[in-house]
Image (cartoon, rainbow, N blue to C red):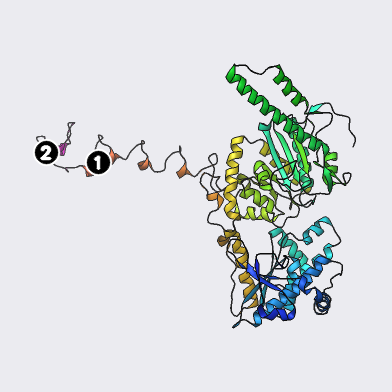
Amino acid sequence: GPYPFGPRRGPFGVANPFGVAVLGLQVHFGRWLIEGSPAVVLLDVGATAWSLERWKGELWESCAIGIPWYDREANDAVLFGFLVAWFLGEFAAQSEGRPFIVGHFHEWLAGLGLVLSRARRLPVATIFTTHATLLGRYLCAGSFFGGSVRFFLGLLGFFASAFFWGGSVGLRGAFWGRGAARDAPPRCRHLDFDLDKTLFFFIAGRYEFSNKGADIFLEALARLNYLLRVNGSETTVVAFFIMPARTNNFNVESLKGQAVRKQLWDTANTVKEKFGKKLYESLLMLDREDFTMMKRAIFATQRQSFPPVCTHNMLDDATDPILTTIRRIGLFNSSNDRVKIIFHPEFLSSTSPLLPVDYEEFVRGCHLGVFPSYYEPWGYTPAECTVMGIPSVSTNLSGFGCFMEEHIADPSAYGIYIVDRRFRAPEESCAQLTAFLYGFCQQSRRQRIVQRNRTERLSDLLDWKYLGRYYTSARRMALAKAFPEHFTYEPPEAAAAVSPNRPQMAPNGPKRPQMAPNNGPKRPQTAPNGPKQRPQMAPNGPKWPQKAPNGPKRPQMAPNGPNRPRTAPNGPKRPQMAPNGPKR
């Protein structure tokens, strides 16, 4: 990787392999301070900036790739690419015997090293993995830059021995690339709902209004608000939008509300302490002064306007997609609305004066994460929710959603709601998302607790011990393509990709569809109260005649056999067994 530190920074020792000091290169070797302490080779890009123009010309002559002079990021990619190609070539040349090298390149910033390795015919098996890159974002947003990025990724896919994308949705895209005013409201308190009956939803990520699904989420919230109001529900939904945008300062109303909340909290604590002392000393309750203090604190929460939707002052308030959509659907945090919206255009931090919590604490405090993305090659946000035991909404246009559909028989039973955005129209997808949100609001507290426990069971599927198999398979494929005489590759079977601890096998969890639940039809032999097919196994039912203790015995089963009168019962005797009767 590139060396990001200064001359005296970084936990890496300086090395001088291959006599690079003569070439004017700087290579740093050390151990990465993470679990496993892997060896790391870092190449100083800045030390070779004097070769930039020469390498640009060589890149154009050999690969017909032009790099603009004003793009610093692209210039660094050129320098790093040539350094990587040089390093791989020197490593292969000075290795004893024939080395089998695998070069795994991530994203286009490292892609030039792959192109140069193939152009120079280095003995390296190459892998290119692209994650949530500019390709899908530009194509989904309709940007004209998509054509050039598509060309470059197509070139990388052509040169690489193996081409991988972080999610099946991105993989399909990779193969495609490879080929109004209102009246003044009355006085109202900002906190006019029961927190015990409040659910917290959130969406977080880059501010990509359509790609991240913020548009369909807002529309679904408007419909959810209508359903909750029409059905007289006491549930209140607070939806957070955590997406960074251009701001210039905090919203004054937000800061004032935070100050009022702190004042109300301090007043309540003061009254509580005085109440405890008076109760102990003279069994007196609250006096007039205490009541006056509490009333003043409560009246301080009243405002002439609705609570602000956005916590900051936006630079482009009139054209911001989220704010303009909120104005269109009419969700202004009215006291009559059952859905409240809070737009926080800044990533969360424990040092923030408005929302002083870290992202992990915030996620654990919410009830549902909603990520109805239109473009999401993998989706780390719903995966993080799953690991922390928080139900989430995803789509079948995200890698995470497709992964869960492949591995879980009934994802919704485990708190993973998959919205169909691939085969349904936007209107139908919005209706499906609304149904998911409304159904979640109808759950009891106990049902939500059980669902969170089930969601946390899926964390094994997202462990690197399981996901790392895909990287291993990719490297084996690359070696088999680059060195077919030494390596073979067999694609893993479908059963091999299944984790041995699949969630549907977890105890007390919901069963797969083929296993009928308690209210579904059952097989006859497992019916608890139905007729038995084998009477001899019934504990209290009729028994076979030979087992009867007092009934008549079968002749062949008589214990003492025929012609033995001493064993005959007290009833009438059979003629052949009478001792003094007439003979037959």
Q: Is residue 523 left or right of residue 215?
A: left
Residue 515: x and y in percent read 53, 47
Q: Secondary structure at mark 1?
A: loop
Cα separation, mark 2 vs mark 1, equals 24 Å
> In the image, 505: left or right of 176?
left
Label 2 crowd (10 A; few <14 / some 14-19 / many >=20): few
First of labels 2, 1 by sequence position: 1
**Horizontal placement of 173 versus 569: left or right?**
right
- Residue drawn at x 56%, y 60% as measured from the top left: 495
Give the residue number, with chain letter if any, for mark 1: 554
Towards the viewer: 522 or 303:
303
Count residues near mark 1 (Cα–Cα under 10 Å), then give few for <14, some for 14-19, many for 20+.
few
Give me the disc on residue 583.
2
* Residue occupying the point 62% across, 74% down: 479
Up/down of 243 relative to 74, above or below: above
Question: In the rendered image of this protein, does residue 495 appear above or below residue 46?
Answer: above
Query: Picture quarter containing residue 279?
Result: top right
Res. 177 image quadrant? bottom right
Amino acid carrying mark 1 in the image:
Arg
Q: Position of residue 42 (x, y in %)?
A: 69, 70
The range drawn in magenta is 559-584
